Image (cartoon, rainbow, N blue to C red):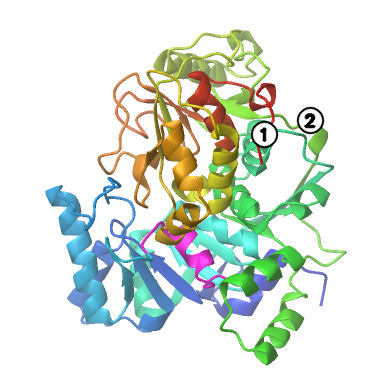
Amino acid sequence: MSDRTLYDKLVDSHTVLQIDEHNVLLYADLHLMNEYTSPQAFSALDARGREVRRPRQQLAVVSHIIPTHAESPRVIRDAASLMQATNLARNCERAGIRLFAANDPLQGIEHIVAPELGLIRPGMVVLCGDSHTTTYGALGALGFGIGTSEVEHVLATQTLVYRLARTMRITIDGALPYGTSSKDIILWVISKIGAQGARGYAVEFAGSTIGSLSAEARMTLCNMTVEAGARAALIAPDAITFEYVRAHAPSIEDSAWQDALESWRGLHSDAGARFDAEHRFDAQHIAPFVTWGTSPDQAVAIDEPIPDESAQTTPEAAASLRRALEYMGLASNRPIAGTPIVRVFVGSCTNGRIEDLRTVAAIVRGKRVAPGVRAMVVPGSGSVRRAAEREGIAKTLIDAGFEWREPGCSMCLAMNDDVLGASERCASTTNRNFEGRQGRGGRTHLMSPAMAAAAAITGRITDVRTLEAPTP
């Protein structure tokens, strides 16, 4: 057998049937659901008289439409949102599917809940009706988003008709510079290859820079790879991966754990494996990155100016730049640093983990949110929220003037009551800065948690490296 990539190994191990040269029937180890992509799938199952084939390999959460106001119990007051949550609860109860509803202590965003509960392990195939399912590649699992009709197919059969992806390897070597993080890595990479640069590819990240990242930082990286058009993102599991999984799945018996490790150590691309595309970068060129436009690839280093129209390589790119700048209320050749903001949002499936909140707390400790700025921190899960409260992070954030919220997707997208007003400019740790993504007319600047913290206390987009070193 020829040398294979990690992607090839994961697909091969889950292929039930080779349909043709380009398509296979793929088995799913775990299927995750939320309240807004599953109702039609359940309705279609009912219409056909079908049942959920393997209820114990499903998990559902209420995350996108839920309010995050600090109240107990939480009440979904919007009628349409309440209907979605109620329908999910009814469907899960009928099918015997585990659900983390609004007031479950384990409620949260699926891409944060599943790893922290030890449900994601190397070698798995994980599906969800949400594009950021690529997150799970951080633990050596093949995860990707699916559509509503595919959700129905998975519920009925625990399989998916899957079109094979091409393979791409992105290698980044070198020490990560001071003040930068995995969020800066992925914004930098997307700015280099473009928002469609990985379209149709399963991307594997490799290199010493990637190997130095924590498991949670790798999740941020894989989470946002879909913003370059990728169908999947993968990192070969290593000691960091195994330590994370062991810590979050302590119930695995020692003998089973040793057997698993033996299998997982083979989950890497073979030395002679060939990729359809390759990119190689040097980490020394990475700086804190900020988006200036309305696509994640419209980003610059904090110490660079907003691009000029004349520098665009095609008329389409120039037109896209003009439209983005008009929407964002910015101008070419001006510095992005110093741009005033009125909102700060820390959270989402990209940066709502405990590690992210620790970063923010370290920077704002002993400081105050700038006058006129409304800053929110929304933990990605109930477990993250409780950990932050135990560690004193929540108190630090509250003392600094941040709103401390309940878990949920919140202001990542305008599907709940945490939204930007027209022309409000937000420093955001989320994954998308599309027009209206956080609210009609809202202006979103994507950045790392550290950069968002710096913006909160200065009232403008600020190079976090210029602030005094955070206190331990």
* Mark 1, secondary structure of its residue: helix
Quadrant of the drawing holding the N terminus = bottom right
Q: Out of 84 and 404, give the one closest to the viewer.
A: 404
Label 1 crowding class (10 Å Cα cut-off): few <14, some 14-19, many 20+? many
Percent of width and height locating residue 465: 69, 26
Residue 166 versus residue 424 in the image, above or below: below
Query: How far separated are the C-alphas under marks 2 and 1?
Result: 9 Å
* Residue indicated by mark 1: 188
Residue at 74%, 32% (x, y): give it: 286
Residue at 87%, 64% (x, y): give it: 272
Percent of width and height locating residue 55: 36, 81
* Residue 146 visible: no
| Residue 336 drawn in magenta | no
Asked whether the beta carbons under mark 2 and mark 1 sit within 8 Å of each other, the answer is yes
Label 2 crowding class (10 Å Cα cut-off): few <14, some 14-19, many 20+? few
Q: Which residues are magenta?
A: 107-120
- The amino acid on which the numbered mark 2 sits, given as a three-letter code, is His
Query: Of marks 2 and 1, which one's residue comes earlier in the chain?
Result: 1
* Residue indicated by mark 2: 285
Q: Out of 110 and 266, give the one closest to the viewer.
A: 110
| Residue 113 drawn in magenta | yes
